[in-house]
Amino acid sequence: MIIILFITLIISFISNIMMFLSIILSKKSFSDREKSSPFECGFDPKSSARIPFSLHFFLITVIFLIFDVEIALIFPIISLFYIVNFIIWTKISFFFICILLIGLYHEWNQNMLNWTN
């Protein structure tokens, strides 16, 4: 029990020394306003905050999130292959892929995938 307490004290002492040294040796510069401000999606932090927001940027972000969630939903379908019958698995996979393709066609038809705007 004493050995565990001793090792814990040594580890906490070493970690406190390392944190103290990093605080002392780190370079602190508060003169640059841009570095101390949070990154806001490519907006210039020194200009006005009331500039018009690009709707195209928002639509691309929503498309990315939708396809990211869809990729997360594909993984259980792959593991479902070994659990259910092949015909049921094929129907489920085909239905899911059809929903993805219909959504992609709708986005393409609405020119949401056009990067030139």
Image (cartoon, rainbow, N blue to C red):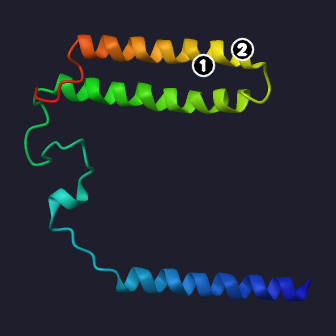
Where's residue 92, x and y in %? 64, 15
Residue found 16% across the figure and 27% down from its top: 53
Residue found 65% across the figure and 31% down from its top: 78
SS at circle 2 = helix
Residue found 80% across the figure and 26% down from its top: 83
Camera-nearest label, 1 or 2: 2
Give residue 5's quadrant in the image: bottom right
Where's residue 82, x and y in %? 77, 30
- Above or below residue 33? Residue 68 is above
Q: Which mark is residue 20?
A: none
Circle 1 crowding by C-alpha within 10 Å: few under 14, some 14–19, many from 20 = some
Q: Please state if 86 lies on the left or on the right of 78 as rendered.
A: right
Circle nearer the N terminus (1, 2): 2
Instruction: Specify the quadrant that holds the C terminus.
Output: top left
Where's residue 102, x and y in %? 40, 11
Circle 2 crowding by C-alpha within 10 Å: few under 14, some 14–19, many from 20 = few
Give residue 51's quadrant in the image: top left
- Above or below residue 79? Residue 17 is below
- The residue wearing badge 2 is 87
Where's residue 60, x and y in %? 28, 28
- The residue wearing badge 1 is 93
The amino acid on which the numbered mark 1 sits, given as a three-letter code, is Ser
Instruction: Specify the quadrant that holds the N terminus.
Output: bottom right
Q: Nearer the viewer, residue 90 or 21?
A: 90
The amino acid on which the numbered mark 2 sits, given as a three-letter code, is Ile
Q: Please state if 13 lies on the left or on the right of 51 as rendered.
A: right
Structural distance between the alpha carbons of marks 1 and 2 = 10 Å
